[in-house]
Image (spheres, rainbow, N blue to C red):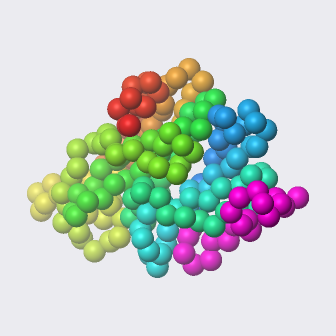
Amino acid sequence: SPLPHDAGPPQHPLTLDDAFKEPLIVRLEGESTRKGLGILVALLRPTERAFPQVVHRAESHDMGGTWSKPMPTALPCHDFAFSAAVLPGTDKMVVAFIERADDAYTVALSASHDGGVQWSRSYHLEPALHTQPTGGSEPNDTKLNRNTPAVRFYSPAVAAGQDGVVHVCYVWGGRALRYVSLSQHWLLKTLQ
């Protein structure tokens, strides 16, 4: 059943229209769950038409029946896929994404200590690689220079285990998977 009007911001069905694609939905597991609220958070990837080019966030307090209006976050999104995980028993989240600055691409992590409202500075798992576009729109369509093969970072995935380890996997070089495991404690300390 819908929330009463005095229960916070106006709620409505989550519609993606032409501004968003590929919603990523996670369930917070911290204080909100202990209070019985069961908050879902949708992280929305903007389309090329959306501005600003950042991840947007919406939330549901009724297990997806209704959603708040998507609001921009500070988390960059340059039309590349990303992945998110809630750290077990908390409202803290980690996101793995492809970060672009000027002509540089890298695999990055960012953390949120408040359910995705605010995000930490990013931590780069790979050095930023300066590229020269070859005509495509994805990072795998770029070359370091004429004498270097294409460098491809894409499809980052992140998962958080009950054992306090955060697992990250992504495609590197277009032909190999890279796997990294990080201590949840170290990650949260580093990504403040």
Residue 143 at least partly seen? no
Viewport quadrant of the N terminus: bottom right
Q: Which residue sits at x=47%, y=58%?
A: 73
Above or below, 159 relative to 162: below
Q: Nearer the viewer, residue 140 or 98?
A: 98
The residue sitting at the front extreme is 6
Question: What span is colored magenta in the figure?
Answer: 1-22
Whether residue 20 appears in magenta in the rendering, the answer is yes
Viewport quadrant of the C terminus: top left
Whole-percent x, y for residue 36 in the image: 79, 38
Whole-percent x, y for residue 106 in the image: 30, 50
The residue sitting at the left extreme is 147
Q: Which residue sits at x=71%, y=67%?
A: 10
Whole-percent x, y for residue 46 in the image: 49, 68
> 38 left or right of 56?
right
Whether residue 86 appears in magenta in the rendering, the answer is no
The residue sitting at the right extreme is 1
> 126 left or right of 55?
left
Dominant secondary-structure state across the stretch colored magenta: loop
Q: Quadrant of residue 15?
A: bottom right
Residue 51 at least partly seen? yes
Q: Which residue sits at x=39%, y=25%?
A: 186
